Amino acid sequence: MTRTTTAPEATITADEKLPIIRITRDFDATPAKLMRAHLDPELFARWVGPDGMDTTVDVWDVRDGGSWRYVAARDGEEFGFRGCFHRIGEDTIVQTFTWEGMPEEVSLETLRFELLDDGRTRLHAQSLCDSFEDRDAWLRSGMEVGVNQGYAKLDDVVSDLAGA
């Protein structure tokens, strides 16, 4: 199912005192559906990243201490990403994130899904980068395009899920 309405944009902010990027976005879905879409490799591959990318999941070991890796490809170019799941909670995911193009740069990501009074869910994502320089490079990279286009696809993925 494809939505005809314009998807809301995520709010992306940089912390002034720490090398952190915070992303907030509301979804018409339960926390359980959003957790499933983040943790099921087939669902994740359907929505992650900007439009026009084909995502292949190579490793997806969803457990505390498990690892993950996927490759996003477009026009003959491939971009690998990898990390480890540090904690999988009922409404929280804590993981590391590395773009293989810069393997020395590792961020610690925390995703939290907050159920709102109207039945929608607010996603709170936080990425703690190694330095202010790394954080600012991410922000200058155009990451908001991939975030917003990916979350628009995530809207469609969770709207297709039954239950929860």
Image (cartoon, rainbow, N blue to C red):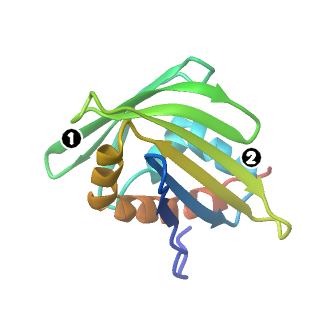
Instruction: Specify the farthest residue to the bottom.
Output: 5
Q: Is residue 85 left or right of residue 137?
A: right
Using the rendered view, name the quadrant where residue 29 is placed: bottom right
Measuring from the top left, give residue 112's x and y in whole percent: 67, 46
Instruction: Specify the farthest residue to the right.
Output: 117
Kindly identify the residue that appears in the image at 39 percent across and 53 percent down: 49
Binning the other alpha carbons within 10 Å of mark 1 as few (below 14), some (14 to 19) or many (20 upward) gives few
Kindly identify the residue that appears in the image at 58 percent across and 24 percent down: 86
* Residue occupied by mark 1: 78
Of pointers 2 and 1, the one earlier in the residue sequence: 2
Whether residue 38 appears in this view of the structure is yes
Going by the numbered disc 2, the residue's amino acid type is: Ala
Label 2 SS: helix
Going by the numbered disc 1, the residue's amino acid type is: Glu
Label 1 SS: strand
* Residue occupied by mark 2: 32
Binning the other alpha carbons within 10 Å of mark 2 as few (below 14), some (14 to 19) or many (20 upward) gives some
Name the mark on residue 164.
none
Is the C-beta separation of discs 2 and 1 under 8 Å? no
